[in-house]
């Protein structure tokens, strides 16, 4: 008796096509043990004090996360107070008609101040330095606003930024200078909170980049704001950036603070005009800024702040920790198929 096993079944897991794994195009998971995965650091060191560094004190995946702290002396040339990590997508990935998925996780040891408010993430244009969308924190309240053609608060929720817990923001941005074509989706802790919000997402034809960290206006404050950042991902689809807090197969870990720091010192920083960039966003979803300006920024000093990398590149492309890549699901089917093929050959020899 002969047993025939179709080769197609042997190589497709017995009729089931292999499952595609997520493949992020960039990962900023800090598992390089420094901040070199990021393109530019803003105020990582001030007056000999380190304000942005890799640490094992807290992590949502792997061993490392970035610790960012904002002191009153972390002053940008225009007077803004900021300590941030910058990621600049590759050329063309924020061009007209392109779509970008981006996500990151963050942890607040203490609730941030209600006054002054703090921006923890935003997208901005190179060269012209116009802020196009931003996440703003006031105490336990989080809001998301788009800036053009008018400043619109697309989502705001009180009581969601609980201290002592990891949170995750994910975004889909359809890039366009046309408000009828530009679009943004937002997920917070795995729940979609903004659905296809229409907005002008491109200021102009320049590439756009993102900052995450802590940004305040030209204000004075006494407290030290702290945020931990981990598992930042850029991708081509939602699976790549996993809007849920934990990556597929990921684990939460923590340990002692190693105090590891990145090579990028962010020297020769650009100057971003303050304007009214840190005015408190309204709390009504869908409201617009009466003068149509909204918070914007504009760099005026040289080419610094453009996102040009000064890092050593260590641990960037080679590190896939936290990417959610799944193992090949066909392993069991392959083994069973080979066993049947071997039995088939033995039976042929016996006949």
Image (cartoon, rainbow, N blue to C red):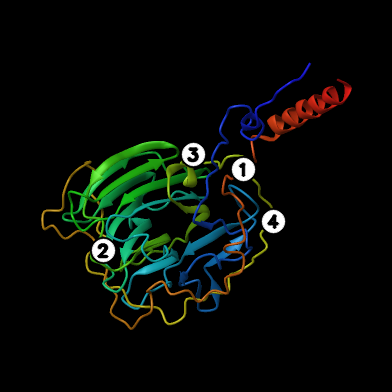
When the figure is inspected, residue 255 is found, relative to residue 339, above or below; the finding is below
Nearer-N-terminus badge (3/1) = 3
Question: Mark 4 touching mark 3, by CB under 8 A?
Answer: no
User: Within 10 angstroms of label 1, few (less than 14), some, or many (20 or more) residues?
Assistant: some
Residue at screen point 35% across, 46% down:
142
Callout 3 secondary element: loop
Q: Which tag is nearer the camera, tag 1 or tag 2?
A: 1
- Name the residue that disc number 2 marks: 277
The residue shown at (64%, 39%) is 328
Dot 4 or dot 2, earlier in sequence: 4
From mark 4 to mark 3, how far is it between C-alphas?
Answer: 26 Å
Q: Residue at x 43, y 75 (%)?
A: 308
Mark 1–mark 2 Cα distance, whole angstroms, equals: 37 Å
Alpha carbon of mark 2 to alpha carbon of mark 3: how far?
30 Å
Which tag is nearer the camera, tag 1 or tag 4? 1
The part of the image, by quadrant, that contains residue 18 is top right
Q: Is residue 316 visible?
A: yes
Circle 1/circle 2 CB separation < 8 Å: no
Say whether residue 107 is visible: no
Dot placed on the residue nearer the N-terminal end, 4 or 3? 3
Q: Which residue is mark 1?
A: 250
Q: Quadrant of the C terminus?
A: top right
The CA distance from mark 4 to mark 2 is 37 Å
Return the residue found at the far front.
351
- Label of residue 307 in the image: none
Dot 3 corresponds to which residue?
A: 244
Residue matched to label 4: 256
Whole-number angstrom distance, CA of label 1 to CA of label 4: 20 Å
Q: Nearer the viewer, residue 197 or 145?
A: 197
Instruction: Tell me: residue 315, above or below residue 148.
Output: below
């Amino acid at each position: 008796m002969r047993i025939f096993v179709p080769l197609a079944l042997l190589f497709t897991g017995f009729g089931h096509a292999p499952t595609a794994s997520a493949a992020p195009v960039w990962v900023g998971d800090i598992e390089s043990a420094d901040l070199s995965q990021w393109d530019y650091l803003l105020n990582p060191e001030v007056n000999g004090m380190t304000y942005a560094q890799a640490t094992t004190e807290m992590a949502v995946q792997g061993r490392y996360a970035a610790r960012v702290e904002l002191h009153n002396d972390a002053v940008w040339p225009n007077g803004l107070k900021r300590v941030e990590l910058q990621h600049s997508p590759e050329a063309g990935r924020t061009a007209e008609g392109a779509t970008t998925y981006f996500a990151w996780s963050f942890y607040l040891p203490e609730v941030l101040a209600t006054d002054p408010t703090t921006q923890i993430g935003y997208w901005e244009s190179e060269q012209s330095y116009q802020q196009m969308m931003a996440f703003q924190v006031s105490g336990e309240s989080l809001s998301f606003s788009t800036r053009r053609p008018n400043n619109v608060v697309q989502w705001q929720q009180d009581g969601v930024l609980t201290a002592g817990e990891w949170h995750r923001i994910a975004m889909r941005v359809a890039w366009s200078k046309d408000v009828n074509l530009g679009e943004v989706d937002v997920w917070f802790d795995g729940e979609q909170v903004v659905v296809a919000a229409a907005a002008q997402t491109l200021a102009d034809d320049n590439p756009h980049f993102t900052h995450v960290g802590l940004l305040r206006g030209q204000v004075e404050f006494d407290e030290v704001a702290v945020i931990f950042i981990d598992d930042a991902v850029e991708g081509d689809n939602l699976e790549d950036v996993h809007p849920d807090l934990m990556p597929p197969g990921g684990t939460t870990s923590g340990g002692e603070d190693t105090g590891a720091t990145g090579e990028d010192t962010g020297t020769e920083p650009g100057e971003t005009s303050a304007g009214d960039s840190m005015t408190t966003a309204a709390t009504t979803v869908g409201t617009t800024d009466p003068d149509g300006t909204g918070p914007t920024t504009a760099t005026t000093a040289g080419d610094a702040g453009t996102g040009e990398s000064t890092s050593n590149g260590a641990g960037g492309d080679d590190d896939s920790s936290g990417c959610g890549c799944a193992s090949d699901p066909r392993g069991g089917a392959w083994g069973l198929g080979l066993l049947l093929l071997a039995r088939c050959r033995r039976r042929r020899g016996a006949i």
